[in-house]
């Protein structure tokens, strides 16, 4: 007797058994989906992430601004780590007195923090998941805004948002914090080569915005920080921004709890020298025993509520 029909029958039986065994899980998943959708909408509203994305994830490498298989998309797909990295980046960026002066004088972040967060999130989303045309339109829009952002900092120096050196600082600080958040709280830890790829793949955005050079590897980022940190300090404007970020904008008790975890996790990502300049204490044991586990649990929950783009 030919064994093939018997093998096919066994295979069909196993598949039927598997379907029966998984049925309860599918039912539970189906029941949870509406809850997940509600939670996801609530998360987006609370943290300024638009329900209507500027574009869906572009999968055609011929028209995508960022290649579909890039490390950038892996990092920027995780809403939890991006929020934590975003808070850390704002803290770190505030240490540059000229960058901070531009934010304090022109952004209105205290009056419309969610609006500013939404605009930043939409720009990152478009230049990560959009088409070439969408990304370059977003870059041109930011350049037009930057041309109007100029003035004199409290220390008497003139500043301009389209200054190539300031663009390098803002970009490097942001990418560093996003990557650190992924390494500490993400679904998986990236290799050194993948980290180098991340910096290299994010560089074109800053260059098109007007930067003349940005770090394109871990070593270059470390060297850049060593070079620039002598010019960084927390002036009065930076300390006001620090206190604003520590308070957050959440109003509901449950949102305040979530934000406190995000803020603590963001601070934990800052280099020790940056914490010192920002007058923030360093509690290594507290970070390891409390902040990191809590932030990882939060990110797991957010990945369920707001799944990474696929």
Image (spheres, rainbow, N blue to C red):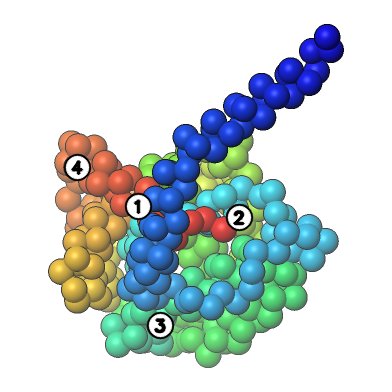
Can you identify the residue that label 2 sits on? 310
Question: Which residue lies under the disc numbered 4?
Answer: 290
Q: Nearer the viewer, mark 4 or mark 1?
A: 1
Q: Is residue 217 left or right of residue 234?
A: right
Residue at far top of view: 1
Secondary structure under tag 4 reads helix
Q: Quadrant of residue 277?
A: bottom left
Residue 115, disc: 3
Q: CA distance from mark 4 to mark 1?
A: 17 Å
Residue at (63, 58) in percent of width and height: 203
Q: Nearer the viewer, residue 141 or 117?
A: 117
Q: CA distance from mark 3 to mark 1?
A: 25 Å
| Mark 2 or 4, closer to the camera | 2
Badge 4 or badge 3: first in the primary sequence: 3
Whether residue 17 is visible, yes or no, is yes
Q: CA distance from mark 2 to mark 4?
A: 31 Å
User: Considering only vertical position in the picture, is 209 above or below 201?
Assistant: below
Q: Quadrant of residue 87?
A: bottom left
Q: Which is more toward the observer, 244 or 231? A: 244
SS class, disc 3: helix
Q: Residues within 10 Å of mark 2 (few under 14, many from 20)?
A: few
Name above or below for residue 226 compared with residue 36.
Answer: above
Q: Would residue 146 appear left or right of 34 to someone viewing this image?
A: right
């Amino acid at each position: 007797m030919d064994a093939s029909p018997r093998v096919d029958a066994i295979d069909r039986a196993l598949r039927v058994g598997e379907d029966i065994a998984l049925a309860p899980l599918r039912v539970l998943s189906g029941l949870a989906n509406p809850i997940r959708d509600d939670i996801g909408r609530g998360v987006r509203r609370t943290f300024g992430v638009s329900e209507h994305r500027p574009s869906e994830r572009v999968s055609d490498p011929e028209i995508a601004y960022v290649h579909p298989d890039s490390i950038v998309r892996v990092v920027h797909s995780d809403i939890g780590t991006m929020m934590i990295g975003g808070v850390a980046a704002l803290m770190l960026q505030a240490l540059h007195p000229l960058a901070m002066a531009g934010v304090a004088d022109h952004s209105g972040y205290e009056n419309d923090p969610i609006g500013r967060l939404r605009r930043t999130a939409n720009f990152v989303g478009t230049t990560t998941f959009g088409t070439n045309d969408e990304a370059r339109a977003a870059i041109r829009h930011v350049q037009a805004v930057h041309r109007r952002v100029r003035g004199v900092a409290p220390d008497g120096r003139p500043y301009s948002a389209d200054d190539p050196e300031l663009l390098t600082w803002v970009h490097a600080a942001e990418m560093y914090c996003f990557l650190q958040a992924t390494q500490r709280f993400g679904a998986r830890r990236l290799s050194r080569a993948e980290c180098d790829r991340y910096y290299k793949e994010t560089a074109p955005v800053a260059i098109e915005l007007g930067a003349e050079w940005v770090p394109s590897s871990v070593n270059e980022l470390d060297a850049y920080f060593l070079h620039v940190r002598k010019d960084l300090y927390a002036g009065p404007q930076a300390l006001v921004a620090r206190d604003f970020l520590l308070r957050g904008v959440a109003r509901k008790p449950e949102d305040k709890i979530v934000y406190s975890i995000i803020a603590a996790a963001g601070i934990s990502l800052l280099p020790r020298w940056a914490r010192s300049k920002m007058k923030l204490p360093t509690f290594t044991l507290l970070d390891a025993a409390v902040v990191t586990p809590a932030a990882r649990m939060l990110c797991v929950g957010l990945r369920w509520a707001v799944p990474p783009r696929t």
